[in-house]
Amino acid sequence: MSRKKPLYDKTFFARQPILMPDQSLWGYELLFRNSSEATSAEISDSYKATLRVAADICAAPGENLPDNVKLVVNFSHKAIMDKVPYSLPAAKTVVQIPETTPPTPNLIKAIKELSEDGFYIAIDDFEGRPQGEFLIAYADAIIVDFLSADKEKLERICKLCKEYETKLIAKRVENTDQFNMAQELGFNFFQGFYFKRPENVKGRKLRSGEIVKLKLLKLIEDSSPDFEAMAEALQNDVSISFRLLTLLNSPTFGFSQKITSIKQALVLAGWKMVKNWLRVILLTDLTPKEKSRELPQLATQRAKFLQLLAQNSDKGLPTDSMFLLGLFSLLGAMFDLPMKELTSYLPLEDEINQALCGEENSYSRYLDLTTFFESGDWDNLDFLLGELELDPVMVAKSYYESTRWANSFFQIPGAS
């Protein structure tokens, strides 16, 4: 009996944030395995289903993405002609078309119809090729690969876009210098890993409030729960105390009695639940205001993703350690400080500290796994899944669940 092709080949997806100049969220690019190869009826059908699933994943359970947040999806010529974009909400969807797509009369007609129906049109990997200069007349934005373009090319593209009053999206912005250049050139939106990487500021030191919160992180990792000490520590932070009581008094938890004290809240909720919640809250509070909310949200998703991998695999990985590995993996970028300085404040075992500081070991391979997922690097992801002997279906499902779980902390109904 011949083996069927595994279903996971059609279900891997990732999402990358696209930010505005103030680093607030403009949209997510949704990356799908095989989306660029959607040429057969079989793949086209599964592609439609994947779009629906991924669009649902971008919203927290029972909530919708804020109206101003876009979903950016790459569509092939055939997918557009098959009206696949209509499987997504027009007001939220950016139809991304590669510049190399032949601008046939039928395609132009379909693009015009999409635009009239409320879809946002973007030309991807724009370099000003002849077909690109034809397509730009029908586009709302163009997307430029910042790593592959020199300044002269970028200036020429910007000049052309001004003529058509087209928005500019810079992708693969990898560092602060590139981000600053993109702003100077007039780019409107930015995508890349620049916001994950620390820009070490000379003389930067941890403030007293930051040290207190890092010490609180140490307290909640104590193997013997001390509700008295925890309640006393939390009562000194009005903001966290208020959020904890609000959360536990909500219908989500369904306690039969009203919670009136921090200690009562800790005991009723249980140490494990409060510990995970506090980890996320403290990490969010520690992130400087000028940093994107995407950093703590991504760190939270990583934490849950790695925890689920540990729970659902037979590798004997410690779930708490894997959670902390993901949760603290972006601390350097959040604080603009070397990770070695930050880990001295954290209650971590040596191997996790080493992985966070960039040393290669068994834990660092799982950090690599998260970055391959986030960037849609499917080839390296496949190789590493084989090397780690992980079930791809389980991994894809864990990513799905981790996205929903992280969104439940960060997406508030009616937020913009």
Image (tube, rainbow, N blue to C red):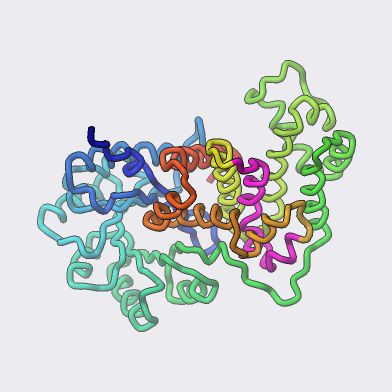
Give the residue displayed 77% in from the left and 24% down from the top: 268
Q: Position of residue 254 (x, y in %)?
A: 67, 20
The answer to whether 308 appears left or right of 37 in the picture is: right
Q: Position of residue 230 (x, y in %)?
A: 84, 39
Give the residue displayed 83% in from the left and 37% down from the top: 224
In depth, the one of 266 and 352 nearer the eye is 352
The reply to whether residue 406 is visible in this rendering is no
Query: Given the current orientation, which residue lies at the most extreme top position?
Result: 256
Query: Given the current orientation, which residue lies at the most extreme front position?
Result: 1
The image shows residue 413, relative to residue 260, as above or below, that is: below
The image shows residue 232, relative to residue 287, as above or below, that is: above
The answer to whether 16 appears left or right of 79 in the picture is: right
Q: State which quadrant residue 319 falls in.
A: top right
- Quarter of the picture containing the N terminus is top left
Magenta-drawn stretch contains 320: yes
Q: Position of residue 93 (x, y in %)?
A: 35, 47
The answer to whether 243 appears left or right of 180 in the picture is: right
Give the residue displayed 32% in from the left and 39% down from the top: 6
